[in-house]
Amino acid sequence: QVQLVESGGGLVQAGGSLRLSCAASGRTFSAYEMGWFRQAPGKDRTIVARIIWNGDGTAYADSVKGRFVISRDNAKGTVYLQMNSLKPEDTAVYLCAARSTRYSTYDYWGQGTQVTVSS
């Protein structure tokens, strides 16, 4: 079992930056691939970025490439999402999730943190 708690959301003007954090507790954090997802009102949940267990591999949605950076600190049991050049369309609830391997589903989810970007 893994418990995930996100923080760092808030209200920011377009062009600004935010850094989200997701703190994990429970089973060995470093064993999991981590992902950041987002869900806007009335829209499906979509993946934003993911990072493999040792941080050497990352992937991003096209909509955030070049603006967002995912990273992790296994010693601290935390995954981060640095969000730069934010746009109003980035407004959503951001959730982190964990899965055992790249072939499995994301089994563990946090409650989410709200990010609102004003124009």
Image (cartoon, grey):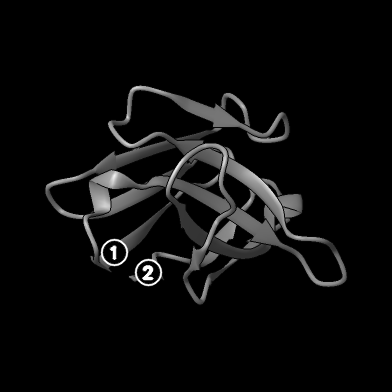
Contact? badges 2 and 1 (CB < 8 Å): yes
Looking at the rendered structure, the secondary structure element under dot 2 is strand
Residue sitting at x 34%, y 71%:
1
Report the amino acid beneath label 2: Leu
Residue 115 can be seen in this image: yes
Which residue position is annotated with label 1?
Answer: 24
Q: Is residue 20 above or below residue 53?
A: below
Report the amino acid beneath label 1: Ala
Which residue position is annotated with label 2?
Answer: 4
Given the current orientation, which residue lies at the most extreme left position?
A: 75
Labels 2 and 1: the sequence-earlier one: 2
Residue sitting at x 12%, y 47%:
75
Q: Nearer the viewer, residue 112 or 2?
A: 2
Q: Residues within 10 Å of mark 1 (few under 14, many from 20)?
A: many
Q: Nearer the viewer, residue 23 or 105?
A: 105
Residue sitting at x 35%, y 38%:
71
Query: Quarter holding the C terminus?
Result: bottom right
